[in-house]
Each structure stands twice: as structure tokens, then as C-alpha cells.
Amino acid sequence: MAARLGLRGKSVGLLLLACLLALIPAGLIGWKAVVEVRDHFAGAYAEQYTLLQMQRVITPVSRELALSRRLADSIVTREWLRQPDDPARQERFLAEAEGFRQHFASRSYFIVEHASGDYYLGDGYGQNGAAPRYRLSPDEPDDAWYFDTMGSTSTYDINVSADQVLDRAMVWVNVKVMDNGTLLGLTGGGIDLQQFIRRFLGNTPAGMTPMLIDSRGTLQVHPDTARLALGSGRNPAEANDSPRIQALVAEADREPLRRAMQDAMRRPGTVVALEAELEGAPRLLSVGYLPELQWLLVTALDLQTAPLLERRWFWPMVVAFGLLLALLTASFAYTTHRLILTPLQRLKLSAQAIAGGHYQSRLPTERRDEIGELSRTFAHMARQVEGYTRNLESQVHQRTQALEEAHAQMVSAHRQLEASIQYASIIQQAILPDDALEQHLHHRYGVLWKPRDVVGGDFYVFRATERGYLLGIVDCAGHGVPGALMTMLARAIIDHALAREGADDPAALLGNIDRESRKLLPQDQLPASIATSMDMGLVWVDPTAGTLTYAGAKIDLHASDGEQLETLAGHRRALGHRRPARYENRVAPLRTGWTYTLCSDGFLDQAGGRDGFGFGNRRFRELLLAQAGRPLEEQMMAFEAALLAHQGDLPQRDDITLLAFRLEPGSADTSSPQPPEETGDAR
């Protein structure tokens, strides 16, 4: 790789490496600066978000407070509370309150008559406010909120409460009804807590957690409703046990948080920021005070969720840096070319001339630098090479004559080797049962046999008996001369198995062949690099019973009528494998007009196509379906054409054997097989 880069590439690469090494500390410094800028803008963002949330909280609550005050200050309300038993005054109040109810966020209002403690509720559904819902009692702990509110000096009260009687969780706005300093009752409306939380937390940005607390830190509104201090404002006795924000922050940050809360309450409308650990994670807290509610708004910002760089900034910076680096690289490359590469190119041309035998070629020796010194040294070397060349020419002539004689001997040996391989091919083809196939099956069979070399490791077998016939293909390990020798050995083993087991039990034949091959070629006595396994598929055809029996070792039997394709799968382990297998027969009906095909893996594994992948099982099955209805001779031609088209210019990878047979429609297999010793497997 370094040699292909050349001097220009190496120099440019060195420059780029230096730039990258310089970029690392610069990047670290820049990253630190970006983080600082991020923190600054994150703080400003948190402050603005807190101010916005304060307005979002104040707006609906202020509206409810204003409506509640108008209802409490209404002359109709005060007249009715002075004489609650007057039906006419109550009717006028109900009409007046109905107008207010339609403007309250919860579409409901309440009013308490102080003298009796009667609690009225108008919600427009089951309660219209005409009759009291229940009566408040100072002895009832759940009613303490009312008496505490009426006993306070404030004219209104706002808190979050889950009313057990009303079965509602609300943000209540309670306003005292007074007439010339006399307490007549308490009235107001409320905002549904879930609705208020959705409005408060709606569209919360990622990494931002807003919450509302009172002056003691009690949680009034939080994304996790399980942490809310329901009723803490109405029952001060329970407020001490209510969830507080102080419990969420680290102990070391509680005092800074308390000071920030006090500072915010002293300066309403401002936001106080501090860094604290909230629930075990660092957060930027922003605290703002809402005097109308007497609550504080706290937002917690996770700085890790804030992106350091906006995408609209990042990519222009990357492009600018790339352009700057490209300009620097181009300038460096141009300078290198002018000062170094051009003189070296002249030296190269002179060296090429010397290499061509022109020793008088002038070298650029006029320079007074390292390149000039190199040129002068090269010129001295050229003169020495010229002398050596003249002395070697006579020796080359002598060696050439010796090489020509050796070449003639190699040609003669090559011709003898070719003749031997051709003779071996004739011997190998002699074991192929073409004559027997033609005699018994006539035109009902087709064979595609393509050794990778002149001889190969694939062959096919056929044995006819009085009850039927056996067909099969064998793929021995290896190809060329070793594969051909394996086929001769395999042929002898198959003949021995046929004599022992008969032709009608393919599984028994495979088992016998597997055992005999292990005896003849024991793996523990052979080098590990020598493969002696065989792939084999054997099918016994019984025309009388109308069935076929198949057993295979890494070879499948495919059957198709052009519309459907069935496959009898062979065992996934080859014969002679280091782990013996138990082969089993598979019986199927012999269908008239169907084509039955056996194929070695050389066809399926042949590389080709645009990406150099194998022919593959999917393409092979599609070809079987497309060709199943054609005559078998035409099928073999189509298979060979499809294989060559897929192979293209790539060499054949392995030996290829494809054997197909068929029982024609309307004709039974009436051939009269001769005894095995007469037909056998001979051609």
C-alpha cells in the first residue's frame, strides 16, 4: 500500500496526519468552550422557560380567582347569605351563580353558608346548588380546612386537594364572602387537577421537569402525581408529612435551595438559578415566585439532553473545515510537485532510457542538492551496468540455447500427459451407463455431465432388474485426476453393495457403501487434507407398484409437473463423513408425466451473475418448474444454457452432473429388463 501511494501520497498523508494531531488538542479546547457556551445558553433557556411557565400557571388561576372574587362580592350573593331561608333571594343567587358556573374552568362552583356550615355545590348536572350537599362541622377532621381558612387573615386561599366527599382532585380557589367586616361564607371555583397538570406540563421539552411547591417546599404539582401533597394547604397539620422538594435533592444542596426560594419570594417576577443534584442526577434548577398563588415554580433542566451544537451550525462548520483542509493539502501537493516530483520525473525518464539500452541518455546532474547528487551517482552506476551488460550478452546466448532444449523436453512431456488424461477420460466414460439407460428408458431420461477438467469426480449409475430399475448420481470429493480415481473406487464399492443388498433398497445401499468406503479409506490413516467423502442420491423405480423409493446423502430428488414442485430431501451428511449417519428410504408415488431430477452441488454452487454468487437453490427450482413439461433432451439443453448464461466469463468451479427421468402419460414402463449381469452399468 505504501509503495502505491508514492512520494506525493506519502507527503500529503503526513500533512493530514499532522493536521489531525494538531486538531486533537484544538478540538478538546473547542469542546470545552462549546460546553461552557452550552451551559450559559441552557441557563438562559431555563430562566425564560420558567418565566413562561409562571405566566401559564398564573393565567388560568388568576382567571378563576377573579371570577371567584366577583361571585363573592356580588350583592345577590351577600343578600342570600344574610337570609339563606328566603326562597326569592336563593332563586336570584342561583340564577346569578349559574352565569359564573359556565365561566369557571371546571363548570362548577361551591358556596358555604358560614352561620350553618351548609356546603352547596353547583355543577350543572346532579347538583344545581339549591340544596346543601352536606354540612361542615368543626369536629370533623376533613372539614378543618374550612375553619382554618375562615380563621386566617387572608381574603382568599388556593391549594390542591382531593375531596373525599366530592370524589374530585381539584386546584381550589376559596374566597371569603364578607359584608362590612362580617364573615358570611366562603365561595369559589376550581380547576380539575388533571386538566391543570396537563396544561402546566403540556409540551414539556425534553430534559425539563417543571413543578409547583408552596413556601415550605411541599409539592403541589409534579409530573408524578403520586408525589403531590393533596390537601396540604387546607390541613396544616398534615403538611409536615407531605412530600417536599427538599427530600428530592441531595443533602448538601438543601440549604442553597432554601436560600434560592427565599430570594425568589423576596423578588417576585425574577428567577433564581442554582445547580443541584436532584434524585441522584445533576440538574440546573430555576426558581420563581407566584405571589398570587403564594407558590413557587421550580424547573429542573438536564444539561445532558441539550445538544452541544445545532445541526444548522455543525454541518457548515464541517464543510468549512473540509474546504480549509483541502486547500492546505492542495497547496502542499503543488509545492511538492514543483520542487521534488518534477526533477524526480526527469530522473525516471533517464533511468527508463538506460533500461532500454540507451546508455548515453543525459541525467539531470546540474542541481546542487540531494536530487543532483542522486543523479550523478545514478550516472556512474549506468556506466558500470553498460560494461556488465556487454559481458552478459554472450552468457545469455548460451543460456537461451539450454532453455530451448529444456522447453522441447517439457512440450514432449506435456503431450504425453495430455494423451494419458485423454485415455483416462475414455476409461471413465466407459463406466457411464448410457447404453443401458437408452435400452431401458429410451427417450424418457436426460443427462447433463460436465467434468470441470477432462476427467472428474462425478458419475451416474443405472441398474435394471426384473422388478424395476435403480438410478443415481455420485459426487466424489475432488476433481480432475484424483476425482476420477475416486470414481473408479466408488464404482467398485457400488457394484459390491448392489451384489450384497440388491437394487431395490437405496438406504441399505448407502449404508453398505458408507461402511465399505471407511474400510478402504480409513481417515485415521490418511492426511487431514485429503477428502474421501461422497455425495450420492439413489432412486429405485418400481413401475408395477407405481412407486419410487429414494435415499440420498447431501443430494435431493426433485419432482415437478410444471405447476408444482416436490422435493424428497436426502440426509445432510455425506458418505464417508467422520460421523456415520443412518440413511432412510422415502417412498413416493410414481406420477405419470412428472419429471424427476437429481443434481450434484457443482450445478448449484457455480459462481456467476453480477455479484459472482452461486446459481442457488431458488433459481434451480424456478428452472425445474419452467422446464418440467418439455422433452427431457430439451430440458438438458435449457439447463446447460441457463448455467452458461449465469456463469458468464467465470471458470467452471466443480464437476456437474444432472440426471432426469420421466414416466410418459398414457404409457406404462413396458421395458423388459434383462438380468443385471447382462445390462449392468456398462455402456
Image (cartoon, rainbow, N blue to C red):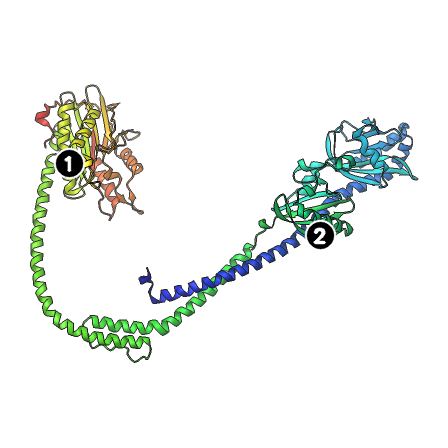
Q: For this view, does 303 lie left or right of residue 87?
A: left
Q: Nearer the viewer, mark 1 or mark 2?
A: 2
Q: For this view, does 107 lie left or right of residue 284?
A: right
Q: Is residue 574 above or below residue 248?
A: above
Under mark 1, the amino acid is: Thr
Residue beneath the point at 33% across and 77% down? 369
In front of the other: 105 or 476: 476
Q: Position of residue 254 (x, y in %)?
A: 69, 46
Residue beneath the point at 60% across and 55% down? 38
Q: Is residue 529 above or below residue 497?
A: below
Q: Secondary structure at mark 1?
A: helix
Under mark 2, the amino acid is: Val
Label 1 – label 2 distance at C-alpha: 92 Å
Q: Residue 450 lies in what quarter of the image?
A: top left
**Furthest-right residue in this view:** 180
Q: Position of residue 510 (x, y in %)?
A: 20, 28
Residue 309 image label: none
Residue 394 visible to an observer of this rendering? yes
Residue beneath the point at 56% across and 55% down? 310
Q: Residue 233 lies in what quarter of the image?
A: top right
Q: Residue 243 lies in what quarter of the image?
A: top right
Task: Look at mark 1 in the image and give the residue it sits on.
Answer: 487
Task: Look at mark 2 in the image and give the residue it sits on.
Answer: 272
Residue 663 visible to an observer of this rendering? no
Q: How many C-alpha atoms fall within 10 Å of the one at disc 1: few (<14), some, or many (≥20)? A: many
Q: Position of residue 86 (x, y in %)?
A: 91, 28
